[in-house]
Amino acid sequence: MCPRRCHRGKWNRSPSRRESVVSLSAGSEQRSEASPEAGGKAKNLHSLTAAGFQVPEWAVLGTDVFAAFARRNGLEERLAKLLTGDGQNGEERTAAETAAEIAALITDAPPDEAVTDAVRRAYEHVGGGPVAVRSSGAEEDGAEHSFAGQFDSFLNVRGLDDVVAHVRRCWASGFSERSLRYRAQRGLALSATGVAVVVQRMVPAERSGVLFTVDPTTGATDRYLVSAVYGLGEGLVSGAVDADTVALDAVTGERLHTVVGEKRESYGAGAGPGCEVRPVAAAYREVLALSDEDLTRLHGLGVRVAEHYGTPQDIEWAIADGEVWILQSRPVTGPLAGPADRRAPASAGEPRGELRIWDNSNIIESFSGVVSPLTYSFAADTYAKVYESYARALAVPPAQLREVQEWTPHLLGYFHGRVYYNLLHWYRMVRLAPLYPLNRRVLERSLGVEENISDELAGTLHPFTPRPGLRGRVSRAYRTAVFARRFLTMRKSVDTFHRDFYRSYEVFDNVDHDALPGEETYRRFRRLQRELIEKWGPMQALDAAILLSVGLLALLTRRWLPDAPEWFVWAAAGPGEGLESAEPVWALAELGKRVAADDEVRALLERTPDDEVYQALRDGDHGEVLAAVDAYIAAYGYRSPDELKLEVPDLHEDPAGLFTLLRGALPGSGAAPRRSEDADSYLAERLRGPRRWVYEIVRRKARASLADRERLRFCRTRAFGAAKRMLRAMGRDLARSGAIEAWDDVFLLRLEEVHGAYEGMIAHTELTDLVAVRRARLAADAALHAPSRFTTHGAPYWSGNLERAGWSATAARTGARELHGTPSCPGVAEGLAVVTDAPRDIGGGILLAYRTDPGWVTALPSASALVIERGSPLTHVAVVARELGIPTVVQVRNVTTEIRSGTRLRVDGAAGTVTVLADPPADTTPTS
């Protein structure tokens, strides 16, 4: 294949009239920028065309065409009822049910002669042949709402019949589940107006891409960003092709930074609708798809388009037969938007400096709420050491390793006592392994981030400066080979690590550190860091293996099982029976049976406060039950709520929390564990032959990788538990020596200050003052409502960054009756909501939590359903909930703000919906 020379044959040039608005109400073609029936996409195309930009011929079927179609098929009243949420018998409907019924109504209704004639006129206006059929919503591509990815577009559609069919599919997408959710999340009204549809001549592109007239890496307005691929831009937009990325000076167009993507494939027109994927010859992969002349023309185009609109633009372009075409342009929405004038300096109120995105997705499972300075600094130090070790394990050369060491210490951030991912660094980490376009998509799903970053921004993120030429290709090939070896031998590596970990762990376990001199405990702590924590780096290849195997499984599912429900991939990848992290659940159930068999002990448990049960068992001479409790604590005492927070005692130190959960484990106390819907039966009905064989190979790798991750999480918890016991002993030692006033003041120090106290590297007389200041500050921080995600520019704590982030004292309710999240485990449950920030007996109700951590697994058997505001389908509790068959929905935005305890809910784990059936009594307040 020769991408630069294909499509050299002449093709019909644009006629003098490049645009047309086809309107049934007018009975003729119109050309009006103000036409509200045209939608946002068409409005922007009109603006570009009228200004003389090179835009392929296009026509738009206004929303009045859809209105006529709906009216003549008797759909108007039915659409209105469906959009109000009423079902056939007055029952409330989910967004998925509404979308499915509307799609069936539209696709089943026949187009009449007038509608077909309108489509014919639009198709003829653009010259016939292959066209793109694109939705154009009323608010789409506007300055406030982009609606990016919410509506459908179809490429390479040929023939009137196919164009009519795809116009109807665009109409249906105006009411798709994702667009209905998009509107609900942003408070936009639902309307039966529908969307307009643009029909546009397909440009036989040799090269395509996106031009950003602002740098998304920093938000700076002094540079543009160009991404380019061979063929059509679908490969870039979908993330399937690793594109070239070039940064240009906004004023001069000078090339500032260049990254040559792999570009292994190109997308072109096939025989039918859609795209045909073709391999790109090696010689073309290794060079930029764009020439210097192309970049000069694109820079000039970006300047003119940005000046025309007066705001930064996201421009989709294509080059064909020497011409640069604008396919569409939209304003840059969100925090990256800058001033219109690229040449003017930023005003005093505008954010400037390096862009950072802070997100608490997933990390909140480990470090919830306000976290002590010692916990944060210990975690940040651990992450830095582990991921530097991971880079070494992937054979990153020394010069590039030094660049990695610049960002690994900053993987986590600390704001008002809360821990956040410094998100862009995690994309850099993922790029250490091959197949970045696929892995970053799975990273976003596994972390459970609310919003994915743009392809343009993702393309600029590298763990180190890529080497050009032959040396760079050899280095990448070697790292790929190293990763492939680790990927293929991962199970053996995990087994070896597991064995060696427990051999070393025995040295630190069951030691009375308080009986040792403080300096000896400190030396043992440093040894634990070296022998247990810093050696963890190579095991991070397991996370990369999970991203890759689950990503491939999701890709095969989309291609071979396109109708599979959203929860299916997570169920198919589930580790299966014998999951080590579910052991505490089954052990607690057995303990519950033992307690239930003794009426006297059961009565004692039910009437005695949690913090007095252990002593009551001892005083009542219930030796056998007490021995069973001690055995549980010995085996799983390190598994407790907030187990990675150093300031929180585990069950060894405070067993009271165990008895809270034990009440819920008594037979008949709540919902019994049950197995989830069998993914095997779903596969058996729908996938056979060689495809099933390939699917199972990938599935086995994904399941094994997830099972191994759960094994390593047990190891991680034990390592943190050992560190917790040592640091508590050091706190008591520092208090005895007078360095701090109380032993637990040690949690208000940072790790480097604890090191300094023992190494003679700190002004020790200042420690008590530091503790007092931090205690007061954390108390004030605890009253703040923390945003789940925010951005900063420049120095994160200053220049108004945190004020813009949305920290506030309270969070307001909107009164939403249906909330949407990510399906994690199928099943439907109805019951009373129990909103809690700590695991406890739910009594068969529906457990709602802002976040969970591994210590919550023992609360799951007493819940009929699980709803989590922050997290993902791959968080620890979600994995265990699937194994127990508990309907689960995660990433339900604002659910703990909107829903109060006592609210009657219906949770649909397959649809990802949480529906309010009845409000709680007026005097019900949230339970914690």
Image (cartoon, rainbow, N blue to C red):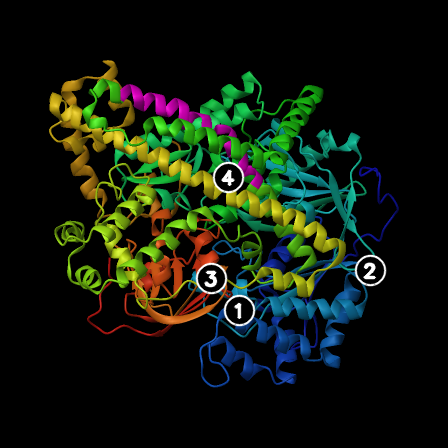
Left or right side of 394 for 470: right
Q: Earlier in the sequence, mark 1 or mark 3?
A: 1
- Residue 116 in view (yes/no): yes
Mark 4 vs mark 3, foreground winner is 3
User: Mark number for residue 341?
Assistant: 4
Q: Magenta includes 695?
A: no
C-alpha span from label 1 to label 3: 22 Å
Q: Secondary structure at mark 1?
A: helix
The residue where tag 1 is placed is: 96
> What is the count of numbered marks?
4
Q: Quadrant of residue 745?
A: top left
Q: Which residue is mark 2?
A: 129
Q: Is residue 537 magenta?
A: yes
Does the residue at mark 1 contact the one at mark 4 (Cβ under 8 Å)? no
| Res 222 seen here | no
Give coordinates of residue 90: x percent, y percent.
Answer: 45, 84
Amino acid type at mark 3: Gly
Res 147 → quadrant: bottom right
Q: How far is the residue under mark 2 from the one under mark 1? A: 35 Å
* Mark whose residue sits in front, 1 or 4: 1
In the image, residue 82 above or below residue 465: below
Categorize mark 2 by other alpha carbons within 10 Å: few (<14), some (14-19), many (20+).
Answer: some
Instruction: Identify whether 248 is placed above or below 698.
Output: above
Report which residue position mark 3 lands on: 885
Disc 2 to disc 3, C-alpha distance: 51 Å
**CB atoms of marks 4 and 3 within 8 Å:** no
x 65%, y 40%: residue: 301
